[in-house]
Amino acid sequence: MKDSLFSPAKVGPLELKNRIVMAPMTRSRAINTIPGENVATYYAQRASAGLIITEGTSPSANGIGYARTPGIFTKEQIESWKKVTSAVHAKGGKIIVQLMHVGRIAHPANMLPGAKIVAPSAIAAKSSMWTDAQGMQPMPQPAELSETEIKQTIAEFAQAAKNAIEAGFDGVELHGANGYLIEQFINPSSNKRKDAYGGSIENRSRFLLETTKAVIDVIGKDRVGVRLSPYSTFNDLEVYPEIPETYKYIAEQLNALDILYLHVIDAMANASEEGRALIAAIRKAFKNTLILAGGYDKAKAVRALEEGRGDLIAFARYFIANPDLPERFRKELPLAEGKEELFYAAGDEGYIDYASLN
């Protein structure tokens, strides 16, 4: 299986030209939440990936927390995303939008007028965030979502999924990882609720599963993926004893929903025997496509595919400075280094000015 990374893959209705996925990466170029022409250029440059998953894109005004991140809840946003999907499809690529509601990981200076910071519980994240207007700022205490507001938030995800299909995306990925709203419900350190959305594993998983079902209802199960990050402590989450039980349950429930794929960040899990066993259990429980992400280079990716641990491998940072990453991997050529100081800058430099081999 020497060419396992470059072999075609069928993921539901999608025919992928290779098993290399461009992972979602915040790049902070969406001025006033609108993806511009440079965003279309950026993704089109990277269309040789088997699958592109976009940067986290908010389903609602309340879901935006960082500076210059995009949304998909207004007509202008949808029309702008159409240019992105058209540019990628013109290059023969496939592209899925990641729907990311940041929850408590937000600051008012980065948000639209009238938006508010919400979370499962009124617990502030113990960290700071960059704002263009005020520099680094501590994140404030969020408002606890009422059950009515939870239902409204789920409906916003569903509407955003409909908007994504209107914009020409091949599907959506629900961001249930990295300490954002969905994982804030899953993790008991950020969810202290006493109602149907807190306490037990089933209750803490309810928001993710109800959101997934709502999105399936409007765009179909073969257009829906979910991203998870067991053992991650990113964005002030804590490791807890029920992690294996929690994620086995979630994998089983998502398998029952027959979604398109499950996308697992396994870097933290692979640091322990218990974590590696959990990833294997997720693989066993979830029967559709499994995407693995987290610190993979070409050699590790090939090994994971050959050992059957995953079906596709996602790469993040490599794609920043190597828009033609699959070709460089195939020809075993050196990889360019990205300019870290420009990863989250506002302009084209360090974004669309990295050269392809051709």
Image (spheres, rainbow, N blue to C red):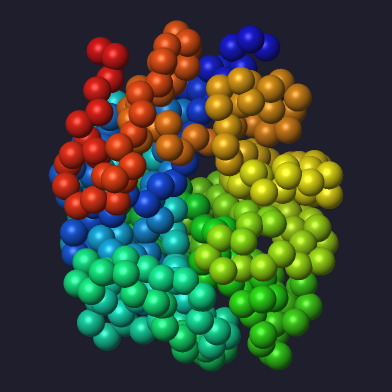
Query: What percent of the width, then of the height, locates residue 11?
Result: 57, 35
Q: Say which residue appears at 67% left-offset and 68% top-offset.
A: 238
Residue closest to the eye, 208 or 346: 346
- Compared across the picture, whether 11 is left or right of 345 comes to right
Quadrant of the rendering where the N terminus is positioned: top right
Number of marks in picture = 0
Q: Say which residue appears at 46% left-offset and 28% top-offset.
A: 50
Q: Is residue 170 visible?
A: no
- Give the image quarter of residue 116: bottom left
Query: What percent of the width, then of the height, locates residue 119?
Result: 51, 80
Quadrant of the rendering where the C terminus is positioned: top left
Residue closest to the eye, 351 or 339: 339
**Residue 113, placed above or below residue 60:** below
Q: Is residue 309 visible?
A: yes
**Residue 46, placed above or below residue 342:** above
Query: What percent of the width, then of the height, locates residue 216?
Result: 55, 59
Q: Say which residue appears at 25% left-offset and 28% top-offset.
A: 354
- Give the image quarter of residue 244: bottom right
Query: What percent of the width, then of the height, locates residue 303?
Result: 69, 22
